[in-house]
Image (tube, rainbow, N blue to C red):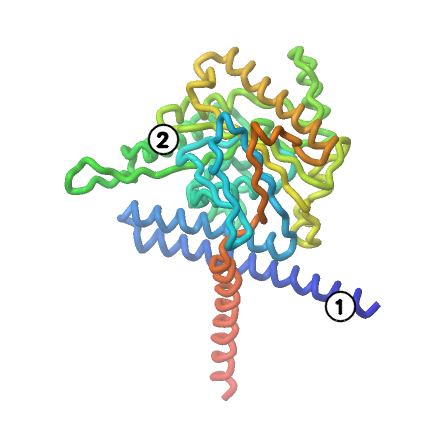
Amino acid sequence: MLGLVLHRFIKLAITIASVIIFILSSLSIVGYQFIANIVWKDEVVRRQTHLDRSKKIFILLLVTILRIVAPSRIRITTENKSIAKGTFMRDVQTGGITSKLARNSVIISNHQIYTDWVFLWWLTYTGNLAGNVYIMLKKSLESIPIMGYGMKNYKFIFMNRRWEKDKVNMANRFEEMDLNARGIGSLAQKTNSEISQIHWPYSLILFPEGTNLSANTRSKSDFYAEKINRTFLKNVLLPRITGLRFSLLCLRESCEVVYDATIGYSGVKKDEYGQDIYRLGNIFLRGQAPKIVDIHLRAFKLSEIPIDDDEMFTEWLFRVWREKDELLDTFYAKGSFDLDPDLNHTVVGWCTIKTSEMLLIVTLPLLLAFMVVYSISKHFLRIFT
């Protein structure tokens, strides 16, 4: 009995500490951005370097908290014919994974739970690209106090769900990303020779389904599939065509590869929904996380994707999603994607970061809190003495 009480107390203490670390670290990140925007206002390259660093720090923060309260192992399988062996490797020092991802890429994936993007963002971290991630978010999130300011500094793309507005917003952001990736944008700084420029990589994470898989969204997806005379999908939602195709058209000059990710979570059965089991509160407050996250990756060169023809692109994307659906059939039946080891490569490791980075994330906000408490205490002591 005493052991159970102690266990619950420790778990509660860890949760409270994690919440405090998240709040203080988030405030520190936004403060860092604010200082960078003021100090390096006229030095665009240096300012962007610091803002990208703040973006990386945020995913370090999220992974640190997950590692403490809800640790998960990641099992990555890659298709040999499109992704070379050795692209992903186990990091012996951290127990995590390292990779050699393309510098400019679009990552597409099925969408099951709200933290899908955290695992995909961490995936870019393994390739030292965590500071160059771009994701699409609801417009309403832009208005969140403090956090909204931080996300705008990350240059995330806020969507109105009205295509005419979103199209302009996306075009502007993608043009900026594309030109900077090619070394001819506003962030390209010419050297004395005026030949060499700075090239800024990007990893654009997209969920073509547009929302999480749930009973409600599946019903809507099935209704739409029937309307356009398409086969019902059992484990994924019907993907949306317009946004992805537009993204690839805008980035065609710089995008090296499209990574197709299929994610499966242990603990979720075929007729269950991941979002009902692994809610944000369950993960971050109760420590309820999947023991293993399976991610299958394959890669498409842009030349292999018919982006210039709307009809052909639609057929291509629906085929990709049917194959994803079949892959998840196997996952739910066997607990893994059960792929041919001669045709695929598998790497397993923790969703984690370097120990030095984790210590930095944990100690800095605590140091900040100590300094604040010390300053307040010192102020009151002066008043009453």
- Sequence-wise, the earlier of marks 1 and 2 is 1
From what the image shows, is residue 197 above or below residue 351?
A: above
Q: Which mark is residue 178?
A: 2
Using a 10 Å C-alpha cutoff, classify the residue at mark 2 as few (fewer than 14 neighbours), some (14 to 19) or many (20 or more): many
Q: Is residue 246 visible?
A: yes
- Under circle 1, the secondary element is helix
Q: What is the crowding at mark 1: few (fewer than 14 residues within 10 Å), some, or many (at least 20)?
A: few
Q: How many marks?
A: 2
Residue in the picture at 47% in, 38% down: 86
Residue at image location 56% in from the left, 30% down from the top: 344
Q: Residue at x 48, y 57 (%)?
A: 357
* Label at residue 292: none
Disc 1 marks a residue whose amino acid type is Leu
At which x and y percent is residue 51?
39, 48
In the rendered image, residue 371, in percent from the top left (x then y), is placed at: 48, 72
Q: Is 168 in front, or is 183?
A: 183
Identify the residue at the far left of this view: 193
Q: Nearer the viewer, mark 1 or mark 2?
A: 1
> Where does label 1 land, which residue?
6
Q: Is residue 180 above or below residue 125?
A: above
Query: Residue at coordinates 63% horizontally, 29% vertically from top-left?
Result: 339
Q: Position of residue 159 (x, y in %)?
A: 51, 32
Query: Is label 2 in a helix, a strand or a loop?
Result: helix
